[in-house]
Image: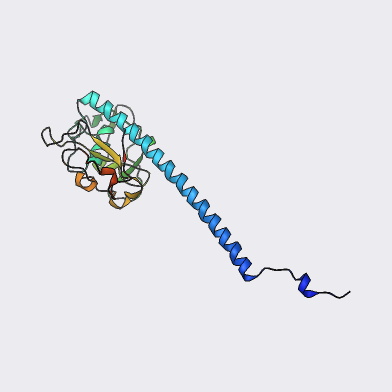
Amino acid sequence: MRWDKAKCAVGFSLVEVLVVLAVVAALAGLIFALAGGIGQRSAVARAEGELAALTHALERFRSLYGDYPWVTGGEGHHNLYAALTGAADVRGRPFPAVDGVRKRQHFVDLSRFTVGRMDSTEPVTPAPVFAGDGVSLLDGDYARHFFMDPWGSPYIYLYRTTPDDGWERAGYILLSTGPSGGQDRLRGRMQDHGVPPSGLLPPDYFERETTHDNILAP
């Protein structure tokens, strides 16, 4: 019997190989896109949960001290951290120490949050660890810390600076700048976030390029 090489040859043409590679690449792209979408939804859900927890803490702060923390120095995210960790009062002033110990009221469980610092691109561990009703040797840099959202930016806190500063909103504004906020993560002033001095958001706030993916606290 004669062996027919043409009939028995096994292999793929260049076109067939390219088609297979194209299909594999398309499937890989789809998988990565789906994974990215799931990760983004998870990050948004985490931000919403942390904003809700901070909102609850702010209400507890107001019920105890009569008002929400004021914004000092134009950077409210530091005021938010200082107030809710019991380091500062409504006006941003540190509580006095008695025998080297600052009596404090805790409003948040720091283990549930990521803490950032203005001169660091990575999360930090505040020192010392908060325990009991007082803490000695309070970290002198607490005013540089902030609560960090899932994208590495501070949760932005906006509120009045004085009783008559023109703030018309009934309460504060608390938000995450969302996935696009990383570039300006240390900017906490109102004008950096499209908010007028009155605190009243413009009707097209969520239609703007720089604020369309902001996540407001409930």
State the image coordinates of residue 26 (x, y, percent, origin top left).
Answer: 54, 57
Horizontally, residue 5 falls left or right of residue 40, namely right
Q: Work out which quarter of the rendered image holds the C terminus and state it.
A: top left
- 160 left or right, relative to 152: left
Classify residue 99 by image quadrant: top left
> Is residue 18 left or right of 71 when viewed as pictured?
right
Task: Check the image and tell me how it is coloured.
Answer: rainbow
Most distant residue in the top direction: 63
Whether residue 85 is visible to the viewer of this picture, yes or no, is: no
Percent x, y of residue 40: 42, 45
- Viewer-nearest residue: 16 or 53: 16
In the drawing, does residue 58 fall left or right of residue 32? Answer: left
Q: Position of residue 116 (x, y in %)?
A: 32, 44
The quadrant of the image that shows the N terminus is bottom right
Q: How many marks?
A: 0
Q: Residue at x 24, y 23 (%)?
A: 63
Residue located farthest toward the left when viewing the structure as drawn: 164
On screen, residue 162 above or below 27: above
Q: 216 or 65: nearer the eye? A: 216
Above or below for 148 versus 171: below
- Residue 193 is at least partly visible in this image: yes
On the image, which quarter does residue 160 sit in? top left
Q: Position of residue 74 (x, y in %)?
A: 18, 43
Q: Residue at x 31, y 35 (%)?
A: 217
